Amino acid sequence: MWLKIEKYLGLSSNQWQFAETSVSQKLSHVYQDAKEHALVMAVCAEAGAGKTGTTEQHVKSNTNVFHLHCNEYWDRRWFLKELLKTMGRDPNGMQMADMMEEVVLKLKELDRPQIILDEADKLRDQVFYFFITLYNKLEDHCSIILIATAYLKKRITRGLSLNKKGYREIHSRIGKRFIDLGQITLKDVILICSANGVTDKSEIKDIYNDCDHDIRRVKRLVHAYKMKAKTAA
């Protein structure tokens, strides 16, 4: 019972603690600026840089922010269903046109809404084009963020070079710019380790040297260090 209560209240000693890194600070600034001014942006960062964790913190701290974890298997209908469910709407029984209209009408009712398409590079082209429709219907009212690894930039750049349908429109709507968040640094790893119970300076340096700028790798190394320390005790 106490374990259940501890988990519900977020007090578990095993729970991974979020730390504000240089990457998360940059991303938080992008989110806030875009939300305040209804901007549309494309953001790139390496896998394991902390994009999703920072996004989840942003969603918790702000109203009218709708975060979608995109998947390769989504078709256009599935995309709209997921977006509506994230917005608290029931898409059952709706046709695609009805779902799109419902999304647009709902967002137009809200103050400074924001859609975050996490791992946007996974979306199929036919779904990717919905971005253009959303932009056209919600310009200057709703912020839309495409966030992914550097593959998003490669994909759009390649689409431009091949003159693929829709890619010039997408490139134009993101301001013809990709925001690069960079990599986590030694200072960031110190913050992450300290927040999660590792304070030994030499151990933190070893973790940094072995993590390849990947927070998921840092998490595994912190876990390994704790298990080693527990065994030694």
Image: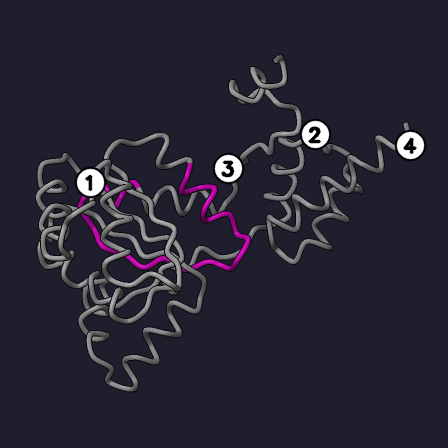
Distance (Cα) linking label 3 and label 1: 24 Å
In this rendering, the label closer to the viewer, 2 or 4: 4
Q: Residues within 10 Å of mark 2 (few under 14, many from 20)?
A: some
Query: Which numbered tag is attached to residue 197?
Result: 2
The magenta stretch spans residue 35: yes
User: Residue beneath label 4, please?
Assistant: 232
User: Residue beneath label 3, please?
Assistant: 20
The residue at the point 34 percent across, 48 percent down is 68
Which quadrant is the C terminus positioned in? Answer: top right
Which quadrant is the N terminus positioned in? Answer: top right
Distance (Cα) linking label 1 and label 2: 37 Å
Magenta segment, which residues?
A: 32-56
The residue at the point 24 percent across, 82 percent down is 164
User: Residue beneath label 1, please?
Assistant: 113
Mark 3: secondary structure: loop
- CB under 8 Å between callouts 2 and 4? no
Mark 4: secondary structure: helix
Q: Is residue 67 left or right of residue 56?
A: left
Which residue ends up furthest to the top in the rendered image? 2
Q: Residues within 10 Å of mark 3 (few under 14, many from 20)?
A: some
In this rendering, the label closer to the viewer, 3 or 1: 1
Mark 2: secondary structure: loop
Mark 1: secondary structure: loop
Residue type, numbered disc 4: Ala
Is residue 198 or residue 219 the one in the foreground?
219
